[in-house]
Structures are given as structure tokens and as C-alpha cells.
């Protein structure tokens, strides 16, 4: 109680000396058992639950559509936050959605629709292919490079390098490389682990925002214009057919401006009928019109209440970093 009182006092003091009313959009991917460290994008469930309680205690957590409307009308409250979750794995429903409900919070889920058919996205297939390799296999050769596999940590290091080697190719090239890798590693046993239509509808009916994340999670700059346009538009159409409502927002895969998407892709998002689109470049939002189709987001990395609250607050009312 003393800590909460002190933190609120600090926040109130900071607010007295700042007129900024920036919007912060927090980015998460997967939430679960921290022992699943092969996936670098996992947030520990215990930590995520704590962060939700801190958000509920100290910030104004808003629905994405409402937050953007308030920002456009210069009515955004201070310390305004939107929670966003990328990709569309089943822990979005089984873990994240359940915890959000327990705290009375809303969030936006950006979903890659190829996961409906496959049950996973390409990086999970590659991850399992590496991690399930027989313990007696000390290394593999892939793309004329040797990757050590003797220890668990060597597997993790090799996996990271292999994912990077595959990621920045076009969808067609990426599939060929994955096939080449599976010929070396063997096809892994991989249970379906993606959201289904019923779960998405349940989240939508509970007030969650459903957003698009392209069909196949490509690096858009690696694709032709026609492929990129289809990835951006077809995902929207598929999700709208599921929830029977407009899908107004897009999050670009990987999401770094210039490196992963360009002005051309922003124009595609606008032409497809999105109201706004999000990058993963760090920062809060203060000007919708200037950056409507390349809006910045924030990542969370602090494990203590003090650091989490103060760093996030500073990014909204001070100089974002």
C-alpha cells in the first residue's frame, strides 16, 4: 500500500509539470510458462498478470478504437494505454483473454490468418524442427553453414540464427528454405496451437478488438506489390467474415519502418480500408495524421512495479525512449 501511495504521488507530480497526452500502445506476443524459452517472444504468465494489475492501478487502459477517437478529438486522458497482442496463438484466448477479463481490461488482437489452416505460423514450425532434433545429432548444415546442436543453449543459438536467415526472404523463397531445413532435421511433431473462429468471436463479443496481421506473416518489403496487397487485404476480409464486423486496424509483421514495410505498404493499408496501422518502432503516439499508417508502439521489459510504472509513464508524458 505504501508503494502504491508513493507511486501515485510521483505520477501526480509528473502530471502537474506535463501537458502531454500521448497514447501508448503496448505490444505483447505470447504469454505462458517462462520455461518455454525457445520462443523469445514469450512473456511469463506471472509477470504478465502483474503488469495487468499495474496497468489497471495506474493507467487509463482503453479500447483501441475509442482511444484513437479521443486522440483525434484532443480528448485523450493522460496516461492512456492500449494493450495489443500480435500473431494469434491460442494462448491469446486461453491465457491472455482470461487474465484480461479478471482485471476488467480490454485489448486488441492482431491475427495472421494462415494460422487457421496450419495451426501455427512458420517460425513455430522451424523452432520445433530444431528443438526436436535427436540428442545424438551434434550439428546440422543448412545454407552452407554449420549449426551446433550439442547442448540446449547451442540449439537456442542456432535456432535464432536460422530464423534470421529464413525470415527476410519472400514467401515463396521462405517455403523452399523451410522445406530444405526439414529435409535435414525431419518434420517435427507439432500440435495445432492457433486461435479458432469460435474463440475469436468470443473475444470480440467480450469487447476485444480484432485486428489484422497479414495472412502469412511475411516481411512485406521482400514481396512483390501484388503479393503484399493480397496479404494486407485478404487478412482483413477473412477476419471480417469471422466476426461479421469491420476490421479497422493492421499491425505489420516484424514491423520496422523501412526495414520491414515502406510508404508503399502504408498506402496499401489505406486502400484496403484500414483506419490505422501499427509498426513495432518504439514510441508513443501524439500525432495521428502524420503517422496514421505507421503508428509506434511500446514494449514492456521491466519486472518490478516501480520501473514498469515510471518508465511507461515517462514515455507518455515525458520524452519517449
Image (tube, grey):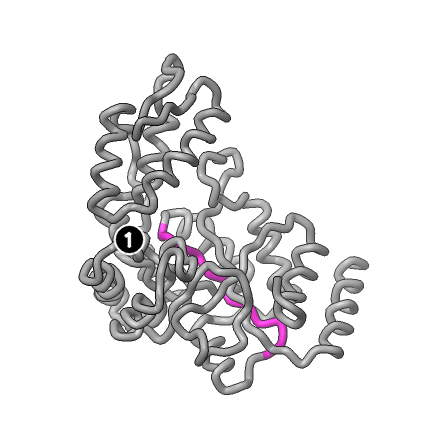
- 267 on left or right of 209: left
- Magenta segment's dominant SS is strand
In the foreground, 135 or 227: 227
Q: Residue at x 32, y 40 (%)?
A: 166
Query: Up-down: is 131 above or below 211?
Result: above
**Residue drawn at the location 69% of the way across and 50% of the way down:** 304
Percent x, y for residue 200? 33, 58
Q: Quadrant of the C terminus?
A: bottom right
199 or 14, nearer to the observer: 14
Residue 257 at x, y percent in the picture: 42, 61
Residue furthest to the bottom in view is 73
Q: Position of residue 76 (x, y in %)?
A: 56, 80
Secondary structure of residue under mark 1: helix
Q: What residue would you read off at disc 1?
A: 222
Q: In the visual, does 40 lie left or right of 142? A: right
Q: Which residues are magenta?
A: 77-88
Q: Quadrant of the N terminus?
A: bottom right
Residue furthest out toward the front: 144
Image coordinates of residue 93 in percent, x first then y, are 40, 52
Up the image or down, 301 lies above or below 313; here it is above
**Residue 104 on the magenta span:** no
22 lies above or below 45: below
In the image, residue 199 above or below residue 316: above
Q: Give the residue displayed 75% in from the left and 61% down from the top.
A: 4
Amino acid at each position: 500500500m505504501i508503494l502504491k501511495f508513493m507511486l501515485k504521488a510521483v505520477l501526480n507530480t509528473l502530471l502537474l509539470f506535463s501537458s502531454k497526452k500521448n497514447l501508448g500502445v503496448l505490444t505483447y506476443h505470447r504469454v505462458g510458462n517462462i520455461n518455454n524459452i525457445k520462443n523469445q517472444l514469450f512473456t511469463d504468465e506471472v509477470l504478465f498478470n502483474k503488469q495487468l494489475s499495474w496497468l489497471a492501478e495506474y493507467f487509463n487502459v482503453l479500447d483501441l478504437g475509442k482511444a484513437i477517437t479521443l486522440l483525434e478529438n484532443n480528448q485523450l486522458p493522460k496516461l492512456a494505454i492500449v494493450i495489443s497482442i500480435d500473431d494469434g496463438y491460442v494462448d491469446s484466448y486461453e491465457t491472455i483473454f482470461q487474465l484480461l477479463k479478471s482485471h476488467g481490461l480490454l485489448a486488441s488482437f492482431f491475427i495472421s490468418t494462415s494460422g487457421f489452416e496450419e495451426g501455427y505460423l512458420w517460425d513455430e514450425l522451424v523452432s520445433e524442427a530444431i528443438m526436436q532434433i535427436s540428442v545424438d545429432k551434434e550439428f546440422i548444415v543448412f545454407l552452407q553453414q554449420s549449426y551446433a546442436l550439442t547442448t540446449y543453449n547451442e540449439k537456442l543459438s542456432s535456432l535464432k540464427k536460422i530464423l534470421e536467415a529464413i525470415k527476410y526472404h519472400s514467401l515463396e523463397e521462405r517455403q523452399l528454405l523451410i522445406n530444405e531445413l526439414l529435409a535435414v532435421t525431419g518434420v517435427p511433431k507439432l500440435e495445432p496451437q492457433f486461435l479458432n473462429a469460435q474463440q475469436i468471436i468470443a473475444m470480440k463479443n467480450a469487447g476485444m478488438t480484432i485486428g489484422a496481421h497479414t495472412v502469412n506473416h511475411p516481411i512485406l518489403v521482400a514481396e512483390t506489390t501484388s503479393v503484399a496487397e493480397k496479404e494486407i487485404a485478404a487478412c482483413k476480409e477473412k477476419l471480417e467474415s469471422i466476426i461479421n464486423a469491420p476490421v479497422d486496424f493492421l499491425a505489420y509483421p516484424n514491423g520496422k519502418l523501412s526495414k520491414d514495410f515502406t510508404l508503399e505498404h502504408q498506402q496499401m493499408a489505406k486502400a484496403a480500408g484500414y483506419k490505422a496501422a501499427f509498426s513495432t518502432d518504439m514510441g508513443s503516439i501524439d500525432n495521428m495524421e502524420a503517422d496514421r499508417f505507421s503508428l509506434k508502439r511500446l514494449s514492456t521489459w521491466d519486472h518490478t512495479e516501480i520501473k514498469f510504472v515510471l518508465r511507461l509513464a515517462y514515455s507518455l508524458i515525458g520524452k519517449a525512449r
